[in-house]
Amino acid sequence: MKSLVPNRFLFDFELDLHYRAKLPAITGTLSDWSDDDLLPKLSALDDGVDFADVWSCWNESGLAIAYRVIGKKRPLRCTANKFWMGDNLRLCTDMRDARTNKRATRFCQQFYFMPVGGGAKSTKPVVGINPIKRARESAPNIDTTRIEIASCVKRDGYALEAMIPAPCLSGFNPQEHPRIGFYYMLEDGDHGQQFLTVGDDLSWHVDPSTWATAVLQQ
């Protein structure tokens, strides 16, 4: 019988975010990532299985993230103005790690990434930012064209990697604030959802207290 309260909801997760003196090259091939950058697979705590590998790392120039999905049978479905309805990854960050805050502050952001859906032929990867609903205050507007993104799509899956530069991370200050709020939600048409801590039923998209803490290791 499925538990009424997910096991992951009972924990305050803290993970190390690997420091890289030189961030991975953003090419879509994932050739520049290592096992040190892999994020923990936590779905097993709720009797689930993670279907994708997700990596992340950082340095003073910004934050990088990558993921790979395999075993796909359906074609990708990615529409920029309805990103939440298709294949996408959302990354939430809180540069002050205010774990007691139930509503987002100006230091909280939600980025979204899609492997296709952009460009004249909708074959280019897409990156955007989605305002966090019910936030106490909004994060400053950013120029998303400064975010590097690349993807590699194959018949049975795809890979995507991106680098968010420091000016696009509201309040990024690793020396004074090395602990940040961190969360991802990966949605796939074949496999469903894979997420770091809790799912849609516990309102991760509006409540930063449900996110994990990432420690910016040096």
Image (cartoon, grey):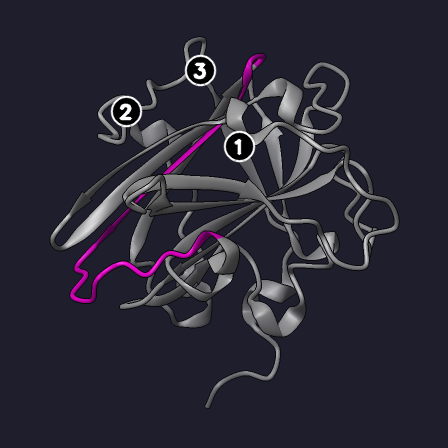
In this orientation, does residue 114 appear? Answer: yes
Which residue shows up at 82% across the image and 52% down it?
135
Q: Residue 68 placed where, x, y %?
A: 28, 45
Q: Residue 18 placed where, x, y %?
A: 47, 25
**Up-down relation of residue 165 to residue 1 (above or below):** above
The Cα–Cα distance between marks 3 and 1, rounded to whole angstroms, is 12 Å
Local crowd size for mark 2, using a 10 Å CA cut-off: few (<14), some (14–19), many (≥20): some
Q: Quick one: 213 or 121, which is closer to the camera? A: 121
**Up-down relation of residue 146 to residue 122 (above or below):** above
Does 96 sit left or right of 42 as displayed? right
Name the residue carrying label 3: 20
**Up-down relation of residue 162 to residue 67 (above or below):** above
Which mark is on residue 16?
1
Name the residue type under label 3.
Answer: Arg
Q: Quick one: 105 or 183, which is closer to the camera? A: 105
Name the residue type under label 1.
Answer: Asp
* Furthest residue toward left: 155
* Furthest residue toward bottom: 1
Figure quadrant of residue 35: top left
Local crowd size for mark 1, using a 10 Å CA cut-off: few (<14), some (14–19), many (≥20): some
Which residue shows up at 56% across the image and 69% down it?
7
Name the residue carrying label 2: 27
Region rendered in magenta? 60-80
Local crowd size for mark 3, using a 10 Å CA cut-off: few (<14), some (14–19), many (≥20): some
